[in-house]
């Protein structure tokens, strides 16, 4: 599912220290806890030590030195996870390895094992090990990092049996999705058979996109009467969910248009089809996303921090409702969103003035 049954979750963005756990009020609600970041983080020395793969695993060790043991542990875990991602050829080509490492460390702390270190009066050194097979890493990435608001679109077009470049339908759909908050990527996808579904899911993985629209557009002559030509434009589309490699929707639209010559009739038919697909498919995609409650607790009494946090939340794609409740230690934002909580946690941690420190579920 794009948004499935949720286990208990806790995320923290804090001033260099982990926040205390929050007890979930309902089994379907996700929790983030954030705090304003006052100072820029001090530079951390990190070294990565690869070790031999054993039993199909991808073991990586990393050592980090930082002002606190917690900061060193997190930096080393990030570096080791980044090294593990690079051991898988499918992952190594991704342009957002650092983002993936952040998400995996935040969501999979149980895979990090501390194997050495030294605590000093001013600086601490920690060495950690991650033993995660390429298959496990890919499963983590699919589950956690594929955003519901990143999409891949590939709709090749044939006119009179000849393959054309980017279709007007694809261009119109990309514009419509962008207007609704999606970030859209292009990819060439084989659209026929099970292999097409696998190729679509792989294209989504490469772009960290959870929704993939693939299919074809065909523009063909219908008839000619008294010098007036008519053409049909047909679109056969499928929506593939990249995190599960499943087809979640199949659509077909057709439009007909007339012209004084073949070129005009074909152009008018394709433009009519483009308008139909751009109007209908984005709403169909949004309907596939299940709404989920998420509570975000801000640890700050500063009014400007509260306003910045609220603005950052409202700017996230997929947020459909937001309620602000003042608490004894700050403010609680109750939101309803169709984005994955893991992606929300990461994006809030990357918002100016905040940092993701912990995510537990």
Image (cartoon, rainbow, N blue to C red):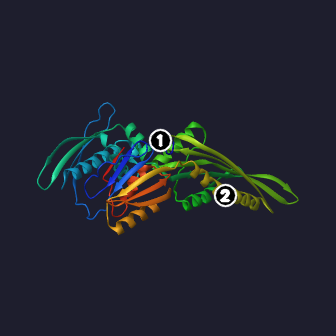
The answer to which quarter of the image holds residue 7 is top left
The residue lying furthest to the right in this view is 226
What is the CA distance from the residue labelled 2 to the residue labelled 1? 36 Å
The residue lying furthest to the left in this view is 121
The dot on residue 356 is none
Marks 2 and 1: which is nearer the front?
1
Q: Residue at x 59, y 60 (%)?
A: 176
Q: Position of residue 127 (x, y in %)?
A: 20, 45
Q: Residue at x 26, y 64 (%)?
A: 40
The answer to which quarter of the image holds residue 44 is bottom left
The residue lying furthest to the top in this view is 55
> Of callouts 2 and 1, which one flags the residue occurring earlier in the amino acid sequence?
1
Q: Position of residue 66 (x, y in %)?
A: 19, 54
SS of the residue at dot 2? helix
The residue lying furthest to the bottom in this view is 304
Can you identify the residue that label 2 sits on? 274
The dot on residue 5 is 1
In the rendered structure, the answer to whether residue 85 lies left or right of residue 164 reads: left
The answer to which quarter of the image holds residue 230 is bottom right
Which one is nearer the viewer's eye here, 326 or 358?
Answer: 326
């Amino acid at each position: 599912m794009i948004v499935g049954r949720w286990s208990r979750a806790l995320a923290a963005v804090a001033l260099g220290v982990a926040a205390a756990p929050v007890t979930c009020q309902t089994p379907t609600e996700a929790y983030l806890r954030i705090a304003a970041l006052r100072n820029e983080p001090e530079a951390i020395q990190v070294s990565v030590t690869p070790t031999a793969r054993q039993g199909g695993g991808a073991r990586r060790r990393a050592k980090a030195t930082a002002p606190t043991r917690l900061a060193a542990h997190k930096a080393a875990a990030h570096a080791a996870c980044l090294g593990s991602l690079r051991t898988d050829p499918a992952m190594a080509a991704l342009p957002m390895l650092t983002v993936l490492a952040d998400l995996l460390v935040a969501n999979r702390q149980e895979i990090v094992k501390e194997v050495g270190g030294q605590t000093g009066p001013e600086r601490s050194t920690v060495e950690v090990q991650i033993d995660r097979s390429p298959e496990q890493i890919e499963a983590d990435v699919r589950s956690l990092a594929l955003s519901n608001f990143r999409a891949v679109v590939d709709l090749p077009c044939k006119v009179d049996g000849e393959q054309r470049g980017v279709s007007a339908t694809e261009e119109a759909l990309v514009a419509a999705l962008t207007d609704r908050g999606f970030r859209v990527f292009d990819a060439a996808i084989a659209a026929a058979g099970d292999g097409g579904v696998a190729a679509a899911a792989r294209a989504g993985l490469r772009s960290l996109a959870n929704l993939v629209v693939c299919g074809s557009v065909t523009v063909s002559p219908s008839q000619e009467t008294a010098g007036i030509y008519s053409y049909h434009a047909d679109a056969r589309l499928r929506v593939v969910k990249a995190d599960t490699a499943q087809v979640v929707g199949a659509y077909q639209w057709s439009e007909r248009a007339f012209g004084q010559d073949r070129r005009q009739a074909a152009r008018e038919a394709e433009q009519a089809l483009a308008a139909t697909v751009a109007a209908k498919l984005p709403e169909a995609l949004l309907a596939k996303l299940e709404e989920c409650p998420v509570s975000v607790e801000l640890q700050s009494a500063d009014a400007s921090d509260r306003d910045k946090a609220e603005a950052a939340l409202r700017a996230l794609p997929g947020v459909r409702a937001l309620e602000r409740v003042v608490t004894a230690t700050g403010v609680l934002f109750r939101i309803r969103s169709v984005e994955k909580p893991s992606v929300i946690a990461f994006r809030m941690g990357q918002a100016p003035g905040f940092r993701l420190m912990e995510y537990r579920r």
